[in-house]
Amino acid sequence: MYGNPPTGGITSGPMTGCGANTMKRLLAGCGVYLQGPDALQKVGVLLGKRGYRKIFLIAGRKAFGAAESRLMPELIKLDGFCTPTFFGGHCTAEEITRYANQAQKQQADCIVGLGGGKVMDLAKAAADEAGLPVFEVPASAATCAAYAPLSVVYNSDGTQHEIRFFDREVDGVFVDTQVIAQAPPRLLAAGLADAMAKACEYATMMPHVAYGTLPMGKYLGFRLAEAADEAIAVCALPAMESVHRREVSPFLEDAVCCAIACTGIVSGLGGFDGRGGARFAIAHAFNEVLRGKWFSPHQWLHGEVVAVGILAQMHANGTHLDQIAARRELFSRMGVPVTLKALSPTLSGEGIHLFEQEILRRIQVSGLQEKAVLEAIDSVTD
């Protein structure tokens, strides 16, 4: 857990419809969430008001360059502010421990992460190991990593090693939409595609979801994810246009909220009834199986790979073909891949067969479900 015993989060005893007669903990929030064109200026102010003085800042170099002029004036007013520590590698177990030890050595009283998803994950995991509060300042909306109570841990070659789940929320998230608007449009597209994975993965292998068909946390997460899908279908393209113009707009604000806050909440809700995700979740399995094996770990963004998996997941779920076609069209207009062949030319012939076997091993299905998964993969092959 991060730092002192949390005051946030909801504990729940036995309730009708909530499953087993056990205590559950809902991690679906964060200590504070601030989003807007001036969020950077609020970081040092809020930390100071909460009594933090020795700030251990982990930053990506590009992100720091984009944020320095508006972030640092308030941070350097804090008496014990530590100079930034830069990070540009993979969030490995070794790096997590190294940064946790540095924070403890400098007697920091909180960790602030500034950068992309790997910096967000590193800051959360290092704070967890060091027993410190953590505040996140994302430089893009490519993932919900700033918000979700987990970290993806990688091997040194960039392949995924594990997912670490934490027992409390992050202490704060500051999303400066001026920074998001200056980031490459590709990052926003990937984040919005990734956000659209939640509803279809929670509804895995079920064309219709109603109360009682899913554990309570996943059911609530599914309904919120549906609302996000509805919003993204409308705001995604205008938001992309805003980023191309490097301007903040209401559509961009809504898109960023869906990609970071809403998706982070949904991730937390999914873990309410047990460790997160969904059984037989195909969309993220695509990313886990493909990255570092069928293409370089750095070639495609997380959401770009997941986008192809989403289309397969929808097919496996029995989603109406017109809805799948509409999603495919949206993804194409956003500029994210919609076929396996687009991700790697080796995903054909024998390559596809090997990929299918890897997916089946990963999601552990059999019988009719296995047939549905194979048909779903075939639907996005070319």
Image (spheres, rainbow, N blue to C red):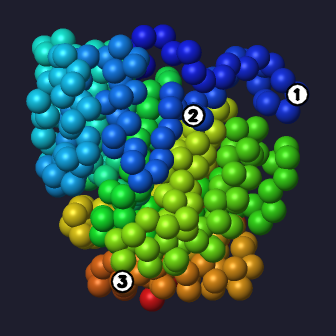
The nearer-to-camera label among 1 and 2 is 2
Residue 194 seen from this side? no
Which residue does the numbered mark 1 point to in the structure image?
A: 16
Decide: is 127 above or below 85: above
| Depth check, front residue: 148 or 80 | 80
Q: Look at the numbered discs 2 and 3 and tell me whether their residues touch, using CB distance below 8 Å.
A: no
Disc with the residue nearer the chain's start (1 vs 2): 1
Label 1 Cα neighbours within 10 Å, binned few <14 / some 14-19 / many ≥20: few
Residue 199 at x, y percent in the picture = 65, 58
Which residue does the numbered mark 3 point to in the structure image?
A: 342
Quadrant of residue 357 within the rendered picture: bottom left
How many numbered circles does the render carry?
3
Q: Which mark is residue 29?
A: 2
Quadrant of residue 173 within the rendered picture: top left
Q: Amino acid at mark 1?
A: Thr
Q: Residue at horizontal 24%, vertical 49%?
A: 67
Q: Quadrant of the N terminus?
A: top left
Residue 356 at x, y percent in the picture = 45, 70
Decide: is 298 above or below 72: below
Label 3 Cα neighbours within 10 Å, binned few <14 / some 14-19 / many ≥20: some
Q: Amino acid at mark 2?
A: Gly
Decide: is 368 above or below 73: below
